[in-house]
Amino acid sequence: MILLNELPCAALITDEKGSVLIVNGALRAIIGGTDDTWHGQPMEVLFPPASRIFLQTHLWPLLLREGSLSEAALVSASACV
């Protein structure tokens, strides 16, 4: 996933359950750690409560219904510090 590291923004890829598979370099610069640190972690740990609620009540249901989501922007917990 070298191309994911070329993005000018933080990005991650999860499985269908929201477990982190890949974190790009821009996101690792914000949250720290390595690919191994984040692999398998639930992506919810990256968000403050309001974003977790939005994710669970809006984004996941949309994904389950529509089967895809082209873009979503959520505030990370580190951005709230």
Image (tube, rainbow, N blue to C red):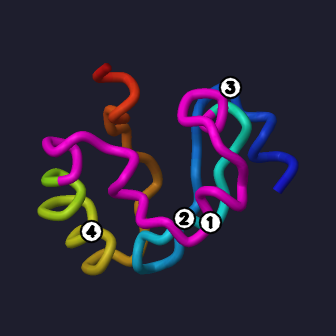
Is 50 one of the magenta-colored residues? yes
- Residue bounds of the magenta highlight: 27-52
Where residue 56 sits: x, y (%)?
19, 63
- In the picture, the disc for residue 20 is 2
Is 3 one of the magenta-colored residues? no
Mark 1–mark 4 contact, CB under 8 Å?
A: no
Instruction: Indicate left or right for 3 with 29 as reference.
Output: right
Q: Residues within 10 Å of mark 3 (few under 14, many from 20)?
A: few
Where residue 57 sits: x, y (%)?
12, 63
Instruction: Indicate left or right for 19 with 13 as reference.
Output: left
Q: Earlier in the sequence, mark 1 or mark 4?
A: 1
Mark 1–mark 2 contact, CB under 8 Å?
A: yes
Q: Earlier in the sequence, mark 2 or mark 4?
A: 2
Q: Which residue is mark 3?
A: 8
On screen, residue 49 above or below 39: above
SS under mark 2? strand
Q: Which residue is mark 1?
A: 39
SS under mark 3? loop
Q: Earlier in the sequence, mark 3 or mark 2?
A: 3
Query: Which amino acid type corresponds to the residue marked 4 in the rendered image?
Result: Trp
Quarter in which the N terminus is drawn: bottom right
Query: Which amino acid type corresponds to the residue marked 3 in the rendered image?
Result: Pro
Q: Quadrant of residue 31?
A: top right
On screen, residue 66 above or below 24: below
Residue occupying the point 44% across, 47% down: 71
- In the picture, the disc for residue 60 is 4
Query: Which amino acid type corresponds to the residue marked 1 in the rendered image?
Result: His
